[in-house]
Image (tube, rainbow, N blue to C red):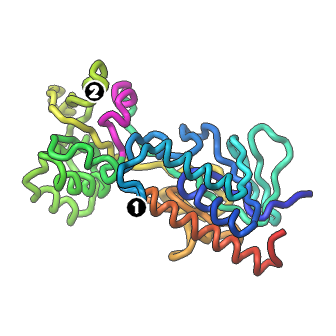
Amino acid sequence: MEVRNVVIIGSGPAGLTACIYAARANLKPLCIEGFNAGGLIPGGQLMFTTDVENYPGFPEKVTGQELMQRFRDQAEHQGTEIITADVTKVDLSERPFKIWVGDGAEPTFATTVIIATGARANYLGLPSEHVLKNKGVSACAVCDGALFRGQPVAVVGGGDTAMEEASYLSGLCSDVTLIHRRDDFRASKAMQNRVIANPKISILRSHEVREVKDVSEDRVTAIEVEDTKSGTSKVIPVSALFVAIGHTPMSELFVGQVDLHPNGYIKTVPGTTQTSVPGVFAAGDVQDWVFRQAVTAAGTGCMAALEAERYLSLAGGAH
């Protein structure tokens, strides 16, 4: 029975950085990069991002696809074995850990596991929104806000994230319209007060986005919103729509295997990537709902690989 030193599940910035560090430590890592689980593809959320301007080392910006290809090439160059398939089941209840890949009947065995399956942004589900994703429709103001500097934009959502996105965008854009489907916000009072006091942010309560225009122009030119009380509609000219209605962590495989927060994100010991199961580590957006940036995900991927190496040395060393 072959037992791998470390199996890394996921291939975004966290997973591939873990691969690079684990391979350099001669742990001979196996990366199961995914195929299409939960709507994500190998490379994670950055594969749906056009221009990345905030990843260090790329002053001329880089596409999300190119950045992730560079991560992947580096991981392979260092000695990572990569399988393009989805993990269908795990058993983390005993050692060695068992991981089932694709349709395979036999599991892969591992001494340590790094979970880096990421999270997916929640969207409204409008056909026009889907077509214009990354063409003015975004789920990350920090990632894409600067592309619409000096232009009018809209944010949809009612929680702290929506308030933070609106506040952030107000420092870049000409004006921000915050749209919420209810009268009451879920956001903290302090966040609400900051947004209400901001002269560049106008708030539409009890409104829902019905359509993102204009698919025919292949870019966002406006949004159509409906007043949920009166049923009347109006069109608001904007250059971008930022959807801030939450993310869903890709943690379904690990329910009952490791401890999760109530919101579904994997619990890690603060300051580490250690989960509730010794030898199992979690990195990137599957355990981080606060920062959600490529550079922070890469940082936790590095941490997870170093912690896995340390765990293996204490358990008798890698093979």
Label 1 Cα neighbours within 10 Å, binned few <14 / some 14-19 / many ≥20: few
Q: CA distance from mark 2 to mark 1?
A: 29 Å
Whether residue 99 is visible here, answered yes or no, is yes
Residue projecting furthest to the front: 60
Label 2 Cα neighbours within 10 Å, binned few <14 / some 14-19 / many ≥20: some
Q: Position of residue 213 (x, y in %)?
A: 25, 26
Q: Position of residue 207 (x, y in %)?
A: 21, 37
User: Which quadrant, please, contains the N terminus?
Assistant: bottom right
The residue at 51%/75% (across/down) is 270
| Secondary structure found at label 1 | loop
Q: Is residue 221 above or below residue 205?
A: above
Residue depth check, mark 2 versus mark 1: number of the one nearer the observer: 1
Three-letter code for the amino acid on which mark 2 is drawn: Glu
In this rendering, would 252 be left or right of 121? right
For label 2, the residue is: 211
Indicate which disc, 2 or 1, sits on the residue closer to the N terminus. Answer: 2
In this rendering, would 96 be left or right of 153? right
Foreground residue, 179 or 70?
A: 70
The residue at 64%/43% (across/down) is 34
The residue at 88%/58% (across/down) is 2
The residue at 43%/43% (across/down) is 63
Q: Which mark is residue 283?
A: none
Q: Is residue 151 above or below residue 117?
A: above
Residue 133 included in the magenta stretch of the image: yes
In this rendering, would 1 be left or right of 173? right
For label 1, the residue is: 291
Q: Position of residue 131 (x, y in %)?
A: 38, 27
Residue projecting furthest to the right: 1
Q: Which residues are magenta?
A: 127-139
Foreground residue, 172 or 248?
A: 172
